[in-house]
Image (cartoon, grey):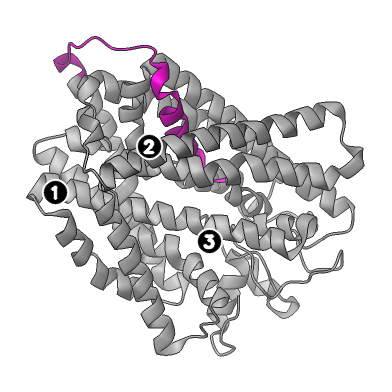
Amino acid sequence: MRVAPSEVDDEIEMKTLLGGEDDELAEDVTELPVDPTVAPFTPSKRKTGGGGGHGHGGAPGTASPSSVAANIFISFVGAGILGLPSAFSKGGWILSSAVTAIVCLLSVKAMMLLIETRKILELKGHTDVEGYGDVGRIVSGVRGENLVNLFLVISQTGFATAYIIFISRNLLSVFGMPSLLTAICVIPFLSYLVNLRSMSRLAPFSLFADFANILGLFIVFVQDVTYLPLNHEHITAFNFSYLLYVTSVTVYCFEGVGLILPLESSSTDRKGFPRLLTIVLASITCLMVCFGTLGYMGFGHGTLSPITLNLSGPTATLVKLSLCTGLYLTYPVMMFPVNTVLEEVFSISGGSKSIRFRVVVVIATSFVAWSVPDFGVFIAFVGASICMILGFVMPAYFHLRALDDEATSKQKAVDYGLIAFGVVMGSLGTLESGKDLIDVVVFGKDLDAE
């Protein structure tokens, strides 16, 4: 991205987090961590030729396996998991558990394809493959890179909007605060935070947000267990009429393919990264299955999305406020690269124009959050429409293009299978969740009550 020459520290951070670096900055850059929310994007100051770039070229990073594992965990265990118990209550606990495991398996495979694609490109002389967008650029030209970054911008904006929906729903349950009032009240401080031009200035907020989110999720998990003896409803095992909804929500939870290349680059053990990724995601899958199943068994068919709406009492209030605070402070971190990309697209170079633009983006996401009060329906729509493409279609397509005529029958079968899964389930899921969105936004239906 274009950064003011005087802001050297910010330039180092942006080039590291977005995947690019200059020779004179390389030594300073190597010690900076990869931020999972920023890393997928690629800067505009990029070589467009074949090899000879200043990428890592397969060199190991500086992050230990334990640090990388923690980054993976924090990146994938987010607000989406709070919508899983409701999805499990709709689809049945066995069907939903199976879908979660299958989506995990396919997601891991797609991520491995992206890692393999980078290795193929490096063997062909491309040493500047730092992020998802780089793969798109080398395989499909500038349009490929722009398309990847476009979908990443939309997905991260969707995640940030989901945070505001979550906050709105929970403040309504705690204080009876109308959604419109919440949407208005979140704007001022968020407008300040998104105008901080350095990730280092956002770091304290990000650390506190991570702590608040993990604490909140842990207490919710404990609360689910305490409610188990109180629910005596019949628990459904299978309900295939909600297969698309469960799949879409689960895909939303596992969206993170754009993080994989930067995380692999940051690892001191790049050869062991695929195994580490598999182990961590398998563990997260077990956590998601337990969280979804226990939440459903604790609250039965009345399980809401997010599940925090089912909780009551002083502890529940603490949990809700903790998660609201954590997600509120995560918003500016999530939108940091989005604003940078959008400002470059619209040729906004800084100053008051940039400030106004970022405030408008905050207002727009707040308005969408107010318009769509259903957390579950919204994340299902994002999961089906955007995450399917990013998570399955593009990695498989880029892998095929990178292999070209060298692809074996087995490789083609796997790639085309992932593309078919993403296109079919994404299209059907988008149609269904889009219809649900219309029912919620236009007709004011409460789908949780049905």
- Residue located 48% across and 86% down the image: 350
Which type of secondary structure does the marked residue at label 2 adopt?
helix
Q: CA distance from mark 1 to mark 2?
A: 20 Å
- Would you say the residues marked 2 and 3 are in contact, meaning their CB atoms lie under 8 Å apart? no
Query: Would you place residue 7 above or below residue 360 in this image?
Result: below
Q: Name the residue that disc number 3 marks.
A: 38
Label 3: how many Cα within 10 Å (few below 14, some 14–19, many 20+): many
Label of residue 198 in the image: none
Task: Say left or right for 69 vs 83.
Answer: right
Q: Position of residue 258 (x, y in %)?
A: 59, 51
- Would you say the residues marked 1 and 3 are in contact, meaning their CB atoms lie under 8 Å apart? no
Query: Would you place residue 382 above or below residue 132 in this image?
Result: above
Label of residue 172 in the image: 1
Q: Position of residue 184 (x, y in %)?
A: 20, 66
Task: Say left or right for 8 vs 230.
Answer: right
The picture quadrant where one finds residue 408 is top right
The range drawn in magenta is: 228-256
Q: CA distance from mark 2 to mark 3?
A: 21 Å
